[in-house]
Amino acid sequence: MSEVMGETRHGPRVRVVVLGTLAAAVIAVGAVMAINRWVTPSSDEAVAEPTSTVADKIDVELIGNGSANKVVDRTTEAGITVRVHLTDDANMFGFPQGQIDAPDWCQVTSTAIVSAVSADAVAQTQMPITKAPGPKGSVSPFWGGQLEGSPLYGVIVQVADDVTLVRGAIAGGGNDEMAPVKGLAALAMAAPAPPKNANPFEPPQANPSIDLIRADGSSTRVTRDALNNGPAIWSDPECQEVFNQENFEPPPPPDPPKLPPASGLTPSDPTAATAEIHEAMLTIYDKGKLADLNRIDLIDDPGGIQFALDHVREFDTDKRLDKFTLEFGDLVFLTDTEASFLYTITIGDQGEIYYHQFGRARLIDGRWKITRATYCQDIVHVGWNCGP
């Protein structure tokens, strides 16, 4: 049985001392003194469990995509409301669909979203759910309430079919247990009050013990490494090996959307006009500062774009602005002076792809120019915007 992480710490609890009724002149001063006074209890004072006053109609907003089904909705003995939703979003974490020869615990099927709500705090996280739990367990801790001085510590665990109960305890804090539902158990417990100078954005000072109990009475304690490393898909060498070898098939690109219907009005030479629009696009996405004059000349409303380009170059150490690759899709003429088209743009060395973007071109003074909105939607991808 392995030791779990952390040490037991009893930190001070903050209290505001309100002075009694005094003369009017004294109250004003006394109130200020009271607000700034901190009272520290003795180190052996018990840590009280938070109680929940959350009404059933109040829910925590889900973080995640995809449709969600609630699979857990319960209240612990300490009054903490715990909810778990399963979404059909299998691509939020882990590998894309279609991976080859990966173990079951490396293949994501859905995402679990878990929340714990007490009277004073909310804790929330999400975890990828795989075809099977990892060989060393699949668990993800979460926490909240440090800023409020009432920390919660929770875990969500994906377990094998033979696990009938998951039990947890926090040294100097609370405890919780539940029978798994759809192979998942979510626990939430009070953690010891934080020290006075604790960073509210760091995990609470909790020393958790999480036990997986089977029907035959045997049990396994979740190790400190498992709690620190999260689910197997993030840390198991077999999952990482599959990923590093690129031993999967990338998902296919989405189907292109439909362009607006053509009006029937076209330029006198649609083929030449299409070629000119494509050439204008290639020019405004050309690389280097020396191309800026030609770039700006072919945008219908270039105000502020040079400023945007200069700003991106100042901070874009990867020079992504000079790493645009275009692929053109369908084009229709809305009138004889305006066209709508689709294009896919790839940015940077890592192949960041934006499929089937809408572009627009206008005929101005006998020349086809690209609209400001078309170019500026891609400036956003490299970390800036063109302004109003």
Image (spheres, rainbow, N blue to C red):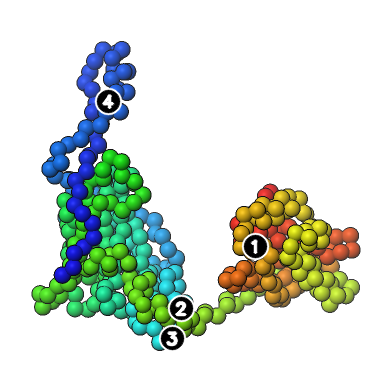
Q: Is residue 19 above or below residue 239?
A: above
Q: In the visual, does 237 lie left or right of 281?
A: left
- Helix, strand or loop status at disc 4: helix
Residue 326: x percent and y percent?
A: 69, 72
Mark nearer the N terminus (3 vs 2): 3
Task: Give the residue number, with chain letter if any, for mark 3.
Answer: 100
Q: CA distance from mark 2 to mark 1?
A: 26 Å
Amino acid carrying label 1: it is Lys
Which image quadrant for residue 30?
A: top left
Q: CA distance from mark 2 to mark 4?
A: 59 Å
Residue 127: x percent and y percent?
A: 35, 67
Residue 338: x percent and y percent?
A: 80, 65
Mark nearer the N terminus (4 vs 3): 4
CB of mark 1 within 8 Å of CB of mark 3?
no
Q: Which residue does the image show at 44% across and 78% down from the upper left?
A: 243
Q: CA distance from mark 4 to mark 3?
A: 65 Å
Residue 178 appearing in the image: no
Q: Residues within 10 Å of mark 4 (few under 14, many from 20)?
A: some
Residue 249 appearing in the image: yes
Task: Give the residue number, with chain letter if any, for mark 4.
Answer: 34
Mark nearer the N terminus (2 vs 1): 2
Task: Give the residue number, with chain letter if any, for mark 2.
Answer: 244
Task: Point out the frontmost of discs 2 and 4.
Answer: 2
Mark nearer the N terminus (1 vs 3): 3
Q: Front-most of 57 and 169? A: 169
- Helix, strand or loop status at disc 3: loop
Amino acid carrying label 4: it is Ala
Task: Give the residue number, with chain letter if any, for mark 1.
Answer: 319
Q: In the visual, does 92 lie left or right of 321?
A: left
